[in-house]
Image (cartoon, helix red, strand yellow):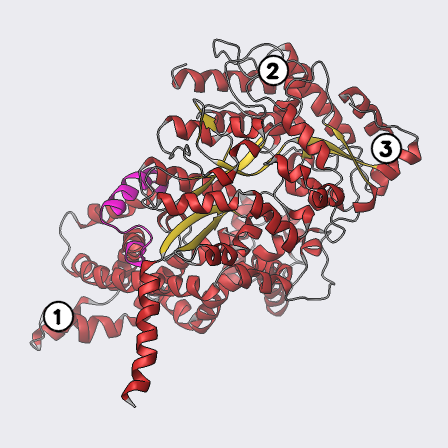
Amino acid sequence: MKLAYAFPLAGLAAAVATAAHAETITVATVNNNDMVIMQSLTEAFEEAHPGIEVNWVVLEENVLRQRLTTDIATEGGQFDVMTIGTYEAPIWAERGWLAALDDLPEAYREDDLLQPVRDGLSYEGKLYALPFYAESSMLYYRTDLFEEAGFEMPEQPSWEQVREWAAELHDPDNQLAGICLRGKPGWGENMAFVSTLVNTFGGRWFDEEWNPELDSQAWQEAISFYVDLLGNYGPPGASSNGFNENLALFSRGNCAMWVDATSAAGKLYNPAESQVADRLGFAPAPVAETPKGAHWLWSWALAIPATSEKQDAAQTFLTWATSQEYVELVGETEGWTSVPPGTRESTYENENYQREAPFAGFVLDAINSADPTDSTLEPSPYVGVQFVGIPEFQSIGTQVGQTIASALTGDTSVEQALQSAQRATERTMQRAGY
Amino acid sequence: MTTLKTKQALPADGQPASASANGATRARHTPLVPSAGARRLWLTLLGWGIALIIFFPILWMVLTGFKTEAEAIADPSLIFSPTLESYIAVQARADYFKFAMNSVVVAFGSTLLALAIAIPSAYAMAFLPTKRTKGTLLWMLSTKMLPPVGVLVPIYLLFRDFGLLDTRTGLIIVYTLMNLPIVVWMLYTFFKDLPRDILEAGRMDGASTFQEVIYLLLPLTLPGIASTGLLSVILSWNEAFWSLNLTSSSAAPLTAYIASFSSPEGLFWAKLSAASTMAIAPILVFGWLTQKQMVRGLTFGAVK
């Protein structure tokens, strides 16, 4: 009788001992589809690494950014793995907030990571975050509408062509907009797109002395073009459309063309989510004066805060979630169109991926040809294609985004909008001591 | 000026238009208020109309929770085949009960603590005022005028040093401090309305201060205390700034749960609606059950 009690007790004690031994790491991430898949594969990680348990904190992007900044700036130490973007990685690394990732295991194959993505996450040649997925921007269009109208998509479309096509295809009576573009204000919303447009029109945010150039000729041309194109041939209420809204519009068949993130391709190709999966064409992002900076580069990456007390366990998780094996695991369990794109050469060499994701080549080319260190026609002092890699840019970008949105709705003229954007930016830069 | 007078006269005498109104005003008002019965009907319709407008976002949220993601973002429609897929997806990703339990503990814990501190202080201010009482009350309320983000960093640092980050105790402390000014103010007004003579009579009979509070003050002002407590519970339940910033996983309440279903990439409205419906359900039911108490408390002392 006593023995019968003793066995389960011993088992319990052993279980408690293991649990006490296991290290729990807290991973903070955003609620994007690829991260949701990562969360659902936690068990696979914990099985492969029995000593580590994963605790998830999932938040909306802006909330997460504020939450992480508070924690890391005050050395709160609440998180062991943080999801950050190309914008934060170098800024935070410079302040010593992130642990350098300079002793990655051989099996991780660091050289397999795409060069521009790796550069975007490095500071002074050292890697501070590992890319989870990366994206550029490209042009999506409806092949059926183009065939009907007799248009042919060239290898590299220009913005002038896009305007002509949009004018022809625009059919508001049948709820079809000639083109859908981002209009919702925000540095990561409309300004991500607008910055690439300004780049290709030959403009830049700042000259080499950090003087804002928002009232320059190139900005005038680019914003007038944008307001004219989206105002005349865009969907109704375009100034409140961000990525999600445009994704929904395009996948319901309400847009003839759309220029946005390459990460939308997987969703648009999925017949369960998109009604245009069988009529989807894609081309490189259109260009105007210069191909430089015409398409952006962004990656969501995982980093370890310097305050984490579980650096080793955190690094084990990082190298798992961004590894080639992880990509294969997602491909096998969730389907190949769902694998996190844009991070590794090996993903694009994979035959399964090439077969299931016909957009793969375009995405790879777009990412490889984006150069955050040289994205403007005239030289600029900053790093970043669709953003300026300085801490002040969040507020500058959002403020300028609002004035451009008001030009789009017709509340102000383009000239007035850019003048007030220029003044606001000058003030912010002066206060910041540039 | 005449029109203004007329409007003021209307509810007072219940008659269509007063003698001071000119003809045009009378002609405009007469058909609108023909009799007391019709007026009541109009008022009822107006009341229902306003209630529906206020309730509509909640209704729409509940409906959206039962749609598929594609339906949720499509053109608004009341006709759809309800599905539980969002609820299943939401529950598969996060354990609702863990978050709900945190919400319950934190909301009720902070309310009890706030009442325990506020009752003695409101008693002192209502029955034993000094010349600085008014100023103190105003100063307490002024702490609510500061945007919370202004003190985020100092509080975050204090919490870090005291090991209170991501703990229920920490949240209870912050919520208590956050609601204390309102709780003290409400209790103060309720206590003020109680005739002093009752307490004096008790004192004459030999009651100590403690007995006075327990046997006289509390039973007599119970509706007021209950509605103050309810308000504090609701405010704590819905608080999102501190709960998002001071917790990460183990003490995260339902507000953090909701925040995890919003997304800048991909469709999320149905799942977000399902999560929000589950998050407000307990407090909504609680509100319904205690509605009587709440209304009684809020109108307590309104008519003497």
- Amino acid on which the number 1 mark rests in the picture: Phe
Q: Chain letter of disc 1?
A: B
Q: Chain of mark 3?
A: A
Q: Amino acid at mark 3?
A: Leu
Callout 1 touching callout 3 (CB < 8 Å) = no
Check the image and report above or below for B280 versus A216: below
Please report whichever mark, 3 or 2, sits nearer to the chain's N-terminal start. Answer: 3
Residue B43 seen: no
**Taking B298 as reference, is A140 above or below it?**
above
Residue A99 belongs to the span the image colors magenta:
no
Relative height, residue A126 to residue B252 (above, below): above
Q: Secondary structure at mark 3?
A: helix
According to the picture, the residue beneath numbered tag 2 turns out to be A376
What amino acid is labelled 2 in the image?
A: Thr
What is the magenta segment's predominant secondary structure?
Answer: helix
Dot 1 corresponds to which residue?
B210
